[in-house]
Amino acid sequence: MKKRPQIRKGAALLVALIFFTCQKEQAESDTTTMEEEREEEITDPFYAVLNENSTLEDYWDLFVKDAIRSGKVDPGEVRLVTVFFGTEPDFASGVTADHAGRAFNICDNKTVSFEIIKSFWEDFTIVQRLYTFYHEAGHARYKYRHPCESSECTSTQTISP
């Protein structure tokens, strides 16, 4: 009979331990979230020219300079560059509500054409804008594809000058 109170004490201790561990994990999770938010700051002076009022043209100019400084040819050289704000995604084209932009004519070596969905852009931070712009510019100019597209998975990217 004495074992039953010991089992209850052990169970109570175990429940208390689990409760405090969960609280500690939640506190650590909250700290991690705050650290991730702080990481959204641009620390590289190269990108410091961007601000809330930067235009798509400002982002394109930076993309060109960044490509050149990393050894790529000028992304707009001998190409018609068209970057514009689109409205809401055209779901019939396969674009979902999660898409913030879309590249066009990626197989055309004479153009660089992509859109950024304006409602996303307006809600994005500068870092999110930079990521989205570079993502779509990479598709449009360098023909970068997602790892799995059109049910064809590839592990290599096609890069053209």
Image (cartoon, rainbow, N blue to C red):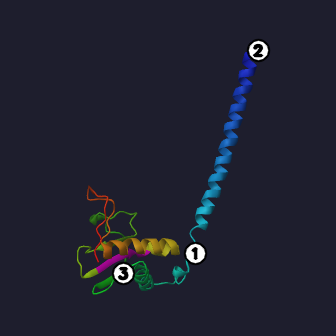
Sequence-first tag of 2 and 1: 2
Kind of residue indicated by mark 3 = Phe
Q: Residues within 10 Å of mark 2 (few under 14, many from 20)?
A: few
Q: Which residue is mark 3?
A: 84
Q: Is residue 124 visible?
A: no
Q: Which element is circle 1 on?
A: loop
Q: CA distance from mark 3 to mark 1?
A: 27 Å
Please provide percent x and percent y for residue 66.
43, 80
Sequence-first tag of 3 and 2: 2
Q: Quadrant of residue 112?
A: bottom left
**110 or 114, which lies in front?**
110
Which residue corresponds to the image point at 56% horizontal and 74% vertical from the top-left? 42
Q: Which residues are magenta?
A: 112-118
For the residues carrying marks 3 and 1, which lies nearer the camera in this image? 1
Q: CA distance from mark 2 to mark 1?
A: 64 Å
Please provide percent x and percent y for residue 45.
56, 80
Which residue corresponds to the image point at 23% horizontal and 77% vertical from the top-left? 108
Which residue corresponds to the image point at 68% horizontal and 47% vertical from the top-left? 24
User: Residue 43 bears which disc, if any?
Assistant: 1
Q: Residues within 10 Å of mark 3 (few under 14, many from 20)?
A: some
Which residue corresponds to the image point at 33% horizontal and 84% vertical from the top-left? 76
Q: Which residue is mark 2?
A: 2
Considering only vertical position in the picture, is 24 above or below 121? above
Query: In which quadrant is the N terminus drawn?
Result: top right
Please provide percent x and percent y for residue 127.
51, 72
Q: Which element is circle 2 on?
A: loop
Q: How many marks?
A: 3
